[in-house]
Amino acid sequence: MIKYLKYVLAMGMLIGYIADAQTATQITAKITSTANVIGNVDLIVLKDLEFVVSSSLSPTELTIDPQKDWQSGQIKLIGFPKSLVRVTSEKQSILLHENGQSQLFFTYNISGSPVNVQGKSILLTKTNEVNLSDRGVYYLWMGGQLSGLENIIPGNYTMELKIDVEYIL
Amino acid sequence: MISIKNILKRWGNLILLSVFVVHLGSAQKINFGAYTTSQGISLVTSGNLNFNDKQPSIGSNSNSTVIIALSDNVYQYVKIVADATRDITITVTASMYMTIGAGGAGKQVPFACNFAYSNLGIADAATAKLSAVEIPAGFTAITLPMLRRTAGVPAPPPTPAHGGYTAPSATAYLFLYGKLGPVGNVNAGSYTGTINVSINYTTY
């Protein structure tokens, strides 16, 4: 009988030891850290700026209102949603005749909106800070005043509009 | 023939002695038995630590560093509810980089996690933060009482568990914040890292 009792005692001690070890309860939690790193803002030209000047009308100046005229050019910016970007553009440019013998002067007006509705766009100054929409887009419309039409030579005139768009970090 | 009965018959005394010696090794402490089983630790996490909440636009190759400080109000926290009479040990480990996928060249940004605690028994996180104690960078584990004594003499020993008795609980907070960057020439995209928090009652 004593022989079995000591085994029972030993088992009791083992169980007690195991139970003691189990009191070291550990609980864990996991938290995720996140960050969206952005690259460049993409610019997509949706529509070129179009001037149609009739020499028979002999205007000296022609104006395109970027907030309402259909001839306005349009660019779509695509980037990180809700981010703040700086839009910088030249204020003036020169249009060169295709044979290089004549030139016209162009002064830009640019308007912008986070939605693709020209009538809701607001005029931007030379440097403007704008927020991309919840979908990460912003629309620009280009218009302006064309001058130097007094001695215009018929033909095609071309120019390049330079717009810089960068994230404000 | 080898059987359990034969083993016990032959080595029984030695086994009994071994168990006794092992048990003696931990006989120096008073064991309050079912304390941790009757009063567990519960954790509630507040959400993800989002560095865009501090700086909406984080540019690749900008070499910028984004720091979320405890005072920035974009920190995250772990709410701890446990036995008010006991000490807890908190271990915080975090990945060294936030990565896209498995990380590697061009797909990882350095990340350092910092943490602070408040154990004054304040139930509200925003209020608890005001008295939080910041842990210097480099430390990953701390031991603290669940409920810090602010004045007076030490309290008497805790009441041993017994039938129908529930030990008082207290709320403590662990606040998590940190630093991202410098952001080098890495791919644009969503970077993630993991902060692991483990908490247990301290044993002495």
Image (tube, rainbow, N blue to C red):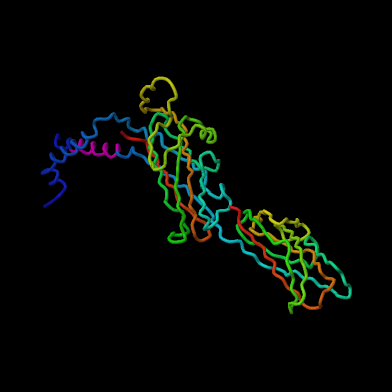
Q: Is residue A42 magenta?
A: no
Q: Is residue A9 left or right of residue A56?
A: left
Image coordinates for residue B204, horizontal then vertical, percent: 30, 33
- Magenta-highlighted residues: A7-20
Q: Residue at x 73, y 77 (%)?
A: A100
Looking at the image, how many numbered discs can be counted on the residues? 0
The quarter holding residue B135 reads top left
Classified by dominant secondary structure, the portion drawn in magenta counts as: helix
Using the image as rendered, state which of residue A106 and residue B87 is in the foreground.
A106
Foreground pick, A153 / B94: A153
Q: Is residue B141 above or below residue B151?
A: below
- At 48% from the left and 42% from the top, the residue drawn is B176
Pinpoint residue B64: horizontal percent, then vertical percent.
Answer: 52, 52
> How far across and down, in percent of the image, does residue A24 sit?
34, 38
Name, please, the residue furthest toward the top: B152
Q: Residue furthest right?
A: A57
Q: Nearer the viewer, residue B67 or A95?
A: A95
Quadrant of the rendering where the N terminus of chain A is positioned: top left
Q: Is residue A58 left or right of residue A140?
A: right
Q: Quadrant of residue A45?
A: bottom right
Up/down of B74 relative to A37, above or below: above
Q: Is residue A19 magenta?
A: yes
Residue A107 horizontal side relative to residue B176, left or right:
right
